[in-house]
Amino acid sequence: MKIAIYSQNSEKHTKKVMVELLNLGKKYNIKFYVESNFHKLLENKLGFQPDYKIFSSYKDLDNSFDLMITIGGDGTLLRSISFIRNLEIPIIGINTGRLGFLATLNQDLLKPELNKILIGKYKVEKRTLLEVEIKGNETINEFAIALNEVTVGRKNTTSMIKIKTNLNGEYLNSYWADGLIISTPTGSTGYSLSCGGPIMSPLSQTLSLTPIAPHNLNARPLIISDETKIELSVLGREKSHLVSLDSRIISVKNETLITVQKAKFKIHIAYFEENSFYKTLRNKLLWGEDKRNL
């Protein structure tokens, strides 16, 4: 069994997780590969130098890997996607962050949960990704993929921006707002939710358009098919605006054509049955909590 490990943390609990993983790895004869920057953190800040192999990029991995384990919060899991891409390696997250909606494994139950992972007692769910093309920007176009959402937003100004939006070539609306969030079902419990967007089931084959602080009473979140090609163009008082893909943010000149659509491949998220989407909604977002249901 081959497992890749990725994290951005160098805290004590990270070392604890690594010790548990490596001990279980010896028990089950598992080969671990640790991302190079995380390896440096372990070595330099935690004085941790166990025997494992190193990977640095997507090119160092292949579909012979059985699993990617991330240690951290949801942001860490989101960043790990750049290493997985279209390899179909399942990702599972050990939550050492705050809420952990994607990274669901519990530190308090670490040993039994790791045992279940390492003997393959988990399920896999395929999640839709968004692919972004920004006209004239070859750097971002190399791997412009987001699991949660793509957002356009204002930059260096308190003034609204105007976001012209076309769906499959047809004009939808020009949003006067602080920004616009295009969310996948996976991302619907994140930033989009905070801005009043709808929660979507991971298997719903939909996307949502959620304006950020729109200056009209009739500009509300809209659910569309994930087969829709979305084209955006932004105008504002500044010369540029921001585009974010999950945690990556870039500056884009106004009136640049931005195309967003479903990616040609999906990311495989591993989970335990007791951590299903609906159970996580109830447990972590207190969905539908009512004293009458106790």
Image (tube, rainbow, N blue to C red):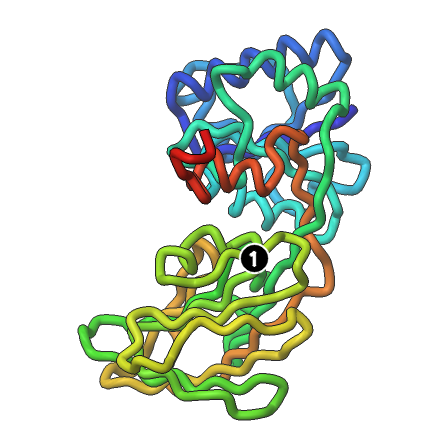
Residue 217, quarter of picture: bottom left
Q: Position of residue 75 (x, y in %)?
A: 46, 43
Q: Image check: 240 left or right of 156? A: right
* Residue 54 in sight in this render: no
Q: What is the x, y in percent for residue 57?
A: 62, 44
* Residue ID at (56%, 57%): 200
Q: Quadrant of residue 191?
A: bottom left
Asked where in the image residue 27 lies, by quadrant, the reply is top right
- Give the SS element for disc 1: loop
105 vs 236: above or below: above
Above/below status of 188 relative to 243: above
Most foreground residue, 29 or 214: 214
Residue at image x 60%, y 32%? 275
Q: Residue at x 76, y 12 (%)?
A: 28
Q: Nearer the viewer, residue 225 or 259?
A: 225
- Nearest the eye: 247 or 159: 159
Q: Residue 78, percent across and down? A: 52, 47
Q: Which of 69 and 227 lies nearest the eye of the viewer? A: 227
Residue furthest out toward the left? 158
Spot occupied by residue 44 in the image (x, y as percentages of width and height): 41, 22
